[in-house]
Image (cartoon, rainbow, N blue to C red):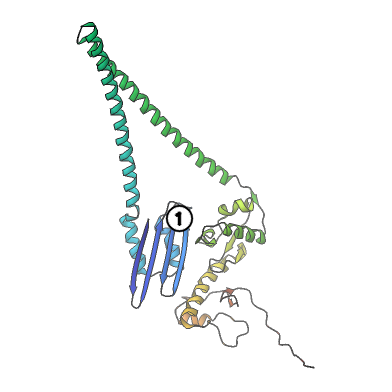
Amino acid sequence: MKQKFTISLNKVTENLELGFEEKWIYAHYKKGATEKTACLLKNDNKSEGEYLDAFFEDNQVSEEMKMEVKNFLRSGISHKDEHWNEFTNFLIKTLSLNMVFGITIALCVFGGYRLGALLDNRYGIYPTFTLIGLFFGIGIGAITVYSMVQKYFKTSIQKGKGIKKSLNKEQENDKSYPIIDVTMDEVRKAIRTFSDNLPKGVYRTILVQDDNCIDFNQLAPHLGGIPSKKFYMSKETYDLFEENEKQIPLEMDIVQKAVDLFVKEHKEFPMLKFDPLHKVNYFQLKQEHYLKEEPKIQFYITDLDGLITHIKPRKKKMGNTSHS
């Protein structure tokens, strides 16, 4: 089911489209020139609101829009169709079974009656065989219906057990991956392979948890196991980090989003002119309220579409050229 939301904020219009599936939440957000699409994978025991909170925070969705979505989720409208379909299917199945049982009993009773009446007419002892035929038909009908009920519920139970067994087997397979030692390059290759197999509109950020730690349960099939140590990834730049650098991706995502917003509104990078290192100017970002506080790590603006890096660039040497 899809649901659309529209909020007008002064001269800017916010549009949000949400699609609720069994294992995914599709989100398409547009605010002015900003547009973002994501498919949020449901892989934890979280509510739909909790999955959307991270998306809202990453894209700086307004409080008004958040409230609209929250009210929508509280009302349970998103599950209205699902519940109605379940009720309809249940009703159809119930009516169908009742009709089958009724017709079966009616045919058995009618058959017993006709057989008894035929014997009564032949031997002239009415209504002896007619009554016997009626009771016989009722008995045969009851036994037939009982057999049908037993067979139906037995099939349903076996089907349920089969599904449960299949789920348990999948869980066992998930837990059967060994603990292995991997390098940064191996993790990078596994993420690339994982990304190549994702559906259109789904990004590798579904691997990144709230603390920027990588969820290796999804990568285990590509790595052949679960790494013995944690790795972290930036949601904005996709840079990888080890445990001793886990603070870098957290601050990197905050600064990258601030830089992007600054560039979008000012058409220039937040850095001092003639700065050979292209350091991100935190003073500008704080002054324009893109940053709440100054990060502890110094980031630098690269030539790759304004992406930032924590690696200090080397100063370019000025070479003398001679002409012959």
Q: Quadrant of the C terminus?
A: bottom right
Q: What is the quadrant of residue 47 in the picture?
A: bottom left
The residue nearer to you, when weighing 143 against 16, is 143
Q: What is the quadrant of residue 119 in the picture?
A: top left
Q: Given the current orientation, which residue lies at the most extreme bottom position? A: 324
Q: Given the current orientation, which residue lies at the most extreme right position? A: 324
Residue 191, horizontal then vertical, whole percent: 60, 59
Residue 106, horizontal then vertical, whole percent: 27, 24
Residue 227, horizontal then vertical, whole percent: 63, 54
Q: Is residue 218 above or below residue 112?
A: below
The residue nearer to you, when weighing 43 against 97, is 97
Residue 14 visible? The answer is yes
Q: Is residue 100 above or below residue 209?
A: above
Q: What is the quadrant of residue 93 in the picture?
A: top left
Give the residue type that dot 1 points to. Trp
Residue 29, horizontal then vertical, whole percent: 42, 67
- Mark 1 Cα within 10 Å, few/some/many (few <14, many 20+)? some
Q: Which residue is mark 1?
A: 24
Which residue is located at x 32 percent, y 33 percent? 97
Q: Secondary structure at mark 1?
A: strand
Q: Is residue 22 left or right of residue 131?
A: right
Q: Quadrant of the N terminus?
A: bottom left
How many numbered badges does the structure rendering display? 1
The residue nearer to you, when weighing 227 against 84, is 84
Residue 132 visible? The answer is no
Which residue is located at x 29 percent, y 21 percent? 108
